Amino acid sequence: MARTRSLFRHAGLALLALATLLLAACASGPRISAEADPTADFGRYRSFAFYSPLAIEAHGYSTPTSNRIRQAARAQMEARGYVYDEREPDLWVNLNAYLQERTDVTTMPEVDYTYYYSYRARAYVAVPYWRERTDVRRYTEGTLNVDLVDARENRLVWTGVAVGHARRGSTPEERGARIDAAMADIFARYPYRAAPAR
């Protein structure tokens, strides 16, 4: 009986550790990826402007969200020494963002117990049995994409993408802070700085 209790205790601790790991994974930030053109000469880029029309403004007008994304991208570029120049930029910055509805289906084994009275042992005995538990979770996934295009050659030289869970019902300030954080995460993968002025 003591051995059975010990077994149940260890199984419970293992499930608790697994649940903690899953919660930690859910609390992490967006997934970031970036890719650079290995043939691009980043040492010659000093200025930038926004591509027109921006992919995020495909309908021909800006929104508070597209303006905040544009501001966040401009702040990141200027923090790296690039100068905003609408007339003759070295780089075009194009921005895109979209939402997709996703469904996750997970199946996990779980243990349950049935009890019966043993006349030989003169006690109730717990007998474990396994079954599958299926959880269905629907959520909205947001993607934020930054493209840097060589303006002279009209060629993509760098792209960065953030993909994560989009939370509904937040305030404009919270949404803005999340946009700023995601843009900073994307540009953390951009290892270049503006070329020094000649």
Image (spheres, rainbow, N blue to C red):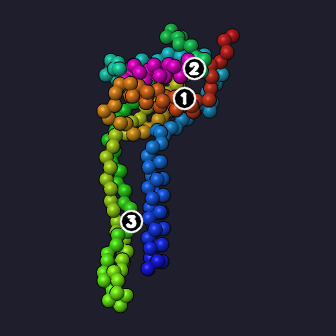
Which residue is label 3 attached to?
Answer: 109
Q: Residue at x 37, y 74 (%)?
A: 128
Q: Nearer the viewer, mark 1 or mark 3?
A: 3
Crowdedness near tag 2: few (<14), some (14–19) or many (≥20) residues, C-alpha within 10 Å: few
Q: Earlier in the sequence, mark 2 or mark 1?
A: 2
Which residue is label 2 attached to?
Answer: 79
Tell me if residue 127 is in the magenta stretch.
no
Q: Earlier in the sequence, mark 1 or mark 3?
A: 3
Type of amino acid at the residue the image marks with label 1: Phe
Q: CA distance from mark 3 to mark 2?
A: 50 Å
Q: Which residues are magenta?
A: 65-79
Q: Secondary structure at mark 2?
A: helix
Q: Secondary structure at mark 3?
A: strand
Q: CA distance from mark 1 to mark 3?
A: 41 Å
Instruction: Provide the major secondary structure of the magenta segment.
Output: helix
In this view, the residue in front, 124 or 80, is 124
Percent coordinates x, y for residue 77 in the rendering = 54, 20
Q: CA distance from mark 2 to mark 1?
A: 10 Å
